[in-house]
Image (cartoon, rainbow, N blue to C red):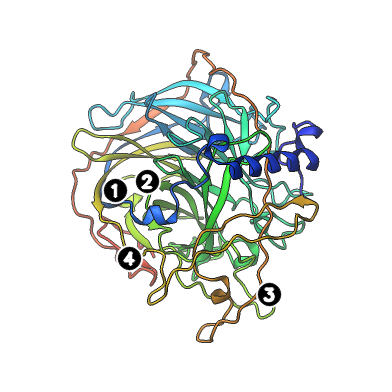
Amino acid sequence: MHANPSPGLRPAETGRPYRAIGLLLTALAIALGPSLAGPAPGALGRAAAQTQPRLTVTEVALLGEIRLTPGGTVLGTPLGGLSGITWDPESEAYLALSDDRGSLAPARYYTLRLDLTDGRLEAGDLSFSSVVTLTDAAGLPFEPGSIDPEGIALATGGPLAGSRFVSSEGDADASPPIDPFLRAFDAAGRQQAALPVPDHFLPAEGGARGVRDNQAFEPLTVSPSGFRLYSGTENALVQDGPAAGPTEGSRSRVLVYGLGSAQIGGPAGRLLSEHVYPVAPIPVAPEPADGFADNGLVELTALDEAGTLLALERSYAVGVGNTVRLFETSVAGATDVSQLDALVDPVSGTPLPVERPMPKRLLADIASLGIAPDNLEGMTLGPTLPDGRRVLILVSDDNFNASQVTQLVALALTLETRAPEPSATASPGATPQPRPTRQPPATESGRLYLPLLLAAGAPAAALTAAPGEPATPTALPLPTRRTAPTQTAAPEPTAEPSVTPGVSATANRIDRRSLAAFARAPEPWVETVASNRDGRDGE
């Protein structure tokens, strides 16, 4: 039995009858057509994505950084723990999410501005506008410890334009565990709706399956159109294999959702597919050798409608510090594993083969750009510079630790448009087959289970064979999905800011230049591009 991640909700809002009725109404509205339900979730579907132009990064340059000394406050709240950031092009402001679980102040995000008019980021370019408290569907602040906010993404278009999506890692070590979630909030911070989370992500008592503690939904991004949302796990689910170690990587899952018009009591969209993102092994050994070290996928940023993403991997090693690397990746053509409850054979303990994980292309090691990265976790695209380059902002989570800093880094990306890749999701020599609508029982484990049309991908049976052996068809259960109720929006807060953080900054302007290759060969699934790495090895 999993704890409700929103303890402030009324029983009538969280009980199964209410949820079931809401979901049935949603399904009926969608079935009756766009006139009632609005655009169907995932209206820009897989076939449409194949015809979309693809963006790719050809160059990365540093515009500067700002470091905030710990202990500052904004509007009476302790500033820190900034683990996610998103840009609002309409207001030209950034929304930065604190991962404070409510122990120092209520769960919240900040609105801030960065002045890049001179093409640099330095002291004096940062100003805070407001702080917005996140509340549940009843308008009540989340109970301390019931939420672990990590990612934030603004839908700038589509059926849920203006919604602020927030991811929470939950608490896998709590008893009972607190489930992770993906929810939509309005401009005032009030919960509107939720996205369904498959059961195989939910942590089990004792840690036997589901997300690992503090390794859940860190990444979060919405496509430019506002029709797709991407999230993922920092490392593999317990039943999918180990977390990243010194010699082996980890199989994170990236979830792709189609967003649709949220109905009362219904979901904000539906799950389209899941894909394996191969997290790299820990890049630098700790000192001493038996000290703590980790590596994980901490952020995704959607570049286009073709499934191209920027991926941020962050590693920490005792005695060494942080290693942060920026990759380009894509879900286009990657195998859909949404029907697989586990990626490890439960009998033999051997990993199940995945035909095509998400490809990776190394863009830059942040240290090689001339700065020392702190615990960078958040990432978002910003405005377009006069020379055509696109701003990319990174932000660090200082863990409210006096020995760390809040760091904002501004990069400039040179982007090129590539023609769409034909038949991106087809297997070589195979005819793509759409996955049929599955008709599971009406309920499972006492929860409503609606039939979902899953995205096309490699047949699940093909993933159950051992390497070198023919696939044996295997019936694989579909996961159940949870939902949350929705409420009407409240007005935008208008409180005046009061900012008192200590600020120091450096702005190391680096001219655009080709990046030198990494010293060591990458993993076989990584395509390395030029990088101006100086010093440490990266793979």
Mark linked to residue 346: 3
Which mark is first along the chain, 3 or 4?
Answer: 3
Marks 3 and 2 sit apart, C-alpha to C-alpha, by: 42 Å
Task: Tell me, yes or no, whether the two marked residues, 4 and 3, touch with CB atoms within 8 Å.
Answer: no
Q: Quadrant of residue 292?
A: bottom right
Task: Tell me, yes or no, whether the two marked residues, 3 and 1, touch with CB atoms within 8 Å.
Answer: no
Residue 432 visible in the current orientation: yes
Give x and y (percent) for residue 99. 58, 37
User: In terms of secondary structure, where does tag 2 sit?
Assistant: loop
Q: Nearer the viewer, residue 199 or 327?
A: 199
Mark linked to residue 372: 2
Give x and y (percent) for residue 186. 56, 28
Marks 3 and 1 sit apart, C-alpha to C-alpha, by: 44 Å
Instruction: Report the residue at 40% width, 57% height from top.
Output: 330
- The residue wearing badge 1 is 369
Q: Nearer the viewer, residue 530 or 210?
A: 210
Marks 1 and 4 sit apart, C-alpha to C-alpha, by: 20 Å
Residue 405 visible in the current orientation: no
- The residue wearing badge 4 is 527
Q: Amino acid at mark 3?
A: Pro
Q: Quadrant of residue 50?
A: bottom left
